[in-house]
Image (cartoon, rainbow, N blue to C red):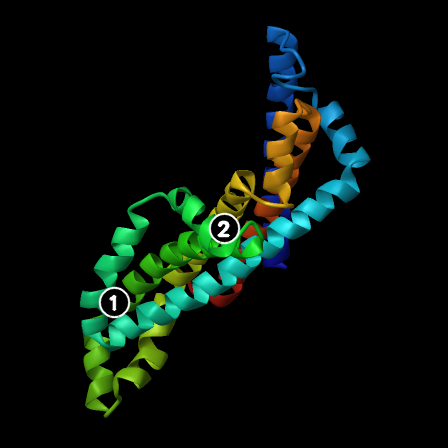
Amino acid sequence: MGNGVLIVARAGYLALGIFIIGCLWEAAIAIFALPPFILPPLASIGGAIWSEFPFLMRGLRATLTVAGAGYAVGAVAAILLALSMVLVPTIERVVKPVIVAINSVPVVAYAPLCLVWFGMGPASKIAMVILAAGFTVFVNALQGLQSVDAAGVNLLRSFGAGPFRIAWMLRLPAALPAIITGLRVAVVRSMIIAIVAEMLGAYEGLGRIIYESTQQIEFLTLWAAIIVASTASMIAYGILVVIDRRLVWWK
């Protein structure tokens, strides 16, 4: 019952926030007499979403495929890599500087290389999402795994537990809040990178729709694609929030 009330309350706050943004949007158009190519009315954008719904859904499906695949691979690889660094500290000393150096450059800068190596298809976009999402999850997972209380580790060792058993019984449960936080941030970054990568070179996807709409001066389609992408990101983030509350119930 309590969870149901909390969900309803959060939905109400979200609806109120969207309502306020909509009012400010329409007020800005009316007060400053903004032309449609700068800020179109929400009703016009809604009409564009309705009329081009199948087209937008095909683009969304392509973008979600790229973002989802890169997110899943990057998250799993990041958690396994962080766990290996905790179990074998030498790996951290050797590999961590390389990972930091790679991610010190914006992921978009690797777009030309990814396009040359993997082509214009989904593989190049997935590779960029793996870099972006993986690093976010990796940083949080490593911090969570290493921030375990030393007294707990020593206690398990006194009972004869080895590194793997300590990791399974203590480190992973203790790091779960940090890992989930990294996953929540990474899911949004995955959508952003997927869309930006599609804008730089792709055959399909919301990013491609946004790029082509800009080139063809179809601003209603442009805004429609942006709102569809934003809605999908919010839903994905909301799913991670629910998972967070289910798994990390003690927070």
Which one is nearer the viewer's eye here, 120 or 64?
Answer: 120
Q: Is residue 32 above or below residue 224?
A: above
- Residue at far bottom of view: 160
Residue at x 36%, y 80% (from the top left corner) = 168
Q: Which residue is mark 1?
A: 146
Q: Position of residue 89 (x, y in %)?
A: 20, 73
Say which quarter of the image contains residue 68.
bottom right
- Say few, some or many: other residues with alpha carbon within 10 Å of mark 2 (under 14 / 14 to 19 / 20 or more): many
- Residue at far right of view: 51
Q: Secondary structure at mark 2?
A: helix
Q: Which mark is residue 127?
A: none
Q: CA distance from mark 1 to mark 2?
A: 25 Å
Q: Secondary structure at mark 1?
A: helix
Residue at x 26%, y 69% (from the top left corner) = 148
Residue at x 48%, y 64% (from the top left corner) = 73
Which one is nearer the viewer's eye here, 186 or 124?
Answer: 124
Q: Position of residue 20 (x, y in %)?
A: 60, 26
Q: Which residue is mark 2?
A: 190
Residue type at tag 1:
Gln
Q: Is residue 1 above or below residue 227?
A: below
- Residue at far front of view: 116
Residue at x 65%, y 11% (from the top left corner) = 35
Residue type at tag 2:
Ser
